[in-house]
């Protein structure tokens, strides 16, 4: 599994092509930070903030249940408030064990930051609670085997390139949240 701890970098197009800068005095372009192609403007973020408090409680009623293999619930503790949160997310079991979650809204997502700070969370998936720990940022190639072909295509089309892989720790009590 190709993994990156923290933010990864990709090579700039000029470096990828093997070309050098026009003059030796010009520095090469800095490598670009790898990320998802999904970029929302301020208006879209405002709409999401208004809709989420209405939609999330409805989704929480069906997520994490046996009949809902696409959605899971990530239970995490706020890194600043220490409050417990339940976030419905697209969760898939990884082939090598653990779970893979797409970073749809990027590194700034509160649930992702909270899991990084705590180092663990509890994932409710198909009616069972799993304590998951050691969040690692992985690319699409590493996360791909966890998804059926049609979902891999959809994730690629909407520009999701980063995923969080969490190791399943079954010997830990699922009741402890972070």
Image: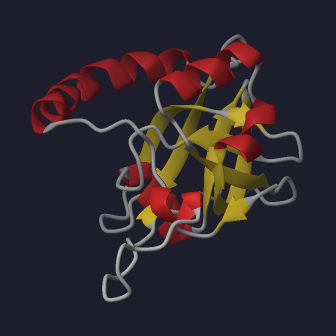
Q: Tell me residue 114's x, y (percent).
A: 44, 60
Q: Tell me residue 95's x, y (percent).
A: 87, 39
State the residue at coordinates (52%, 32%): 89
- Numbered label tally: 0
Q: Is residue 125 above or below residue 32?
A: above
The quarter of the picture where residue 22 lies is: bottom left
Q: Is residue 160 above or below residue 25?
A: above
Q: Is residue 12 visible?
A: no
Q: Nearer the viewer, residue 109 or 83?
A: 109
Q: Is residue 19 above or below residue 46?
A: below
Q: Tell me residue 63's x, y (percent).
A: 56, 22
* Screen quadrant of the C terminus: bottom right
Q: Nearer the viewer, residue 122 or 42?
A: 42
State the residue at coordinates (87%, 58%): 171
Q: Is residue 51 left or right of residue 58?
A: left
Q: Is residue 63 left or right of residue 79?
A: right
Residue farthest along the front direction in this orientation: 23
Q: Is residue 73 left or right of residue 40?
A: right
Q: Nearer the viewer, residue 124 or 133?
A: 133
State the residue at coordinates (31%, 68%): 80
């Amino acid at each position: 599994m190709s993994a990156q701890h923290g933010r990864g970098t990709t090579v700039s197009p000029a470096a990828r092509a093997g070309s050098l800068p026009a003059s030796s005095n010009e520095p090469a372009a800095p490598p670009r930070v790898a990320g998802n192609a999904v970029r929302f403007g301020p208006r879209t973020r405002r709409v999401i903030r208004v809709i989420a408090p209405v939609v999330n409680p409805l989704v929480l009623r069906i997520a994490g249940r046996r009949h809902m293999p696409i959605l899971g619930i990530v239970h995490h503790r706020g890194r600043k408030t220490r409050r417990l949160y339940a976030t419905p997310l697209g969760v898939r079991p990884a082939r090598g064990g653990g779970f893979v979650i797409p970073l749809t809204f990027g590194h700034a997502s509160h649930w992702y930051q909270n899991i990084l700070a705590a180092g663990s969370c509890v994932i409710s998936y198909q009616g069972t609670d799993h304590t998951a720990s050691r969040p690692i940022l992985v690319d699409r190639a590493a996360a791909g085997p966890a998804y059926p072909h049609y979902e891999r295509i959809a994730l690629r089309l909407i520009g999701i390139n980063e995923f969080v892989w969490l190791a399943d720790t079954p010997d830990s009590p699922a009741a402890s949240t972070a």
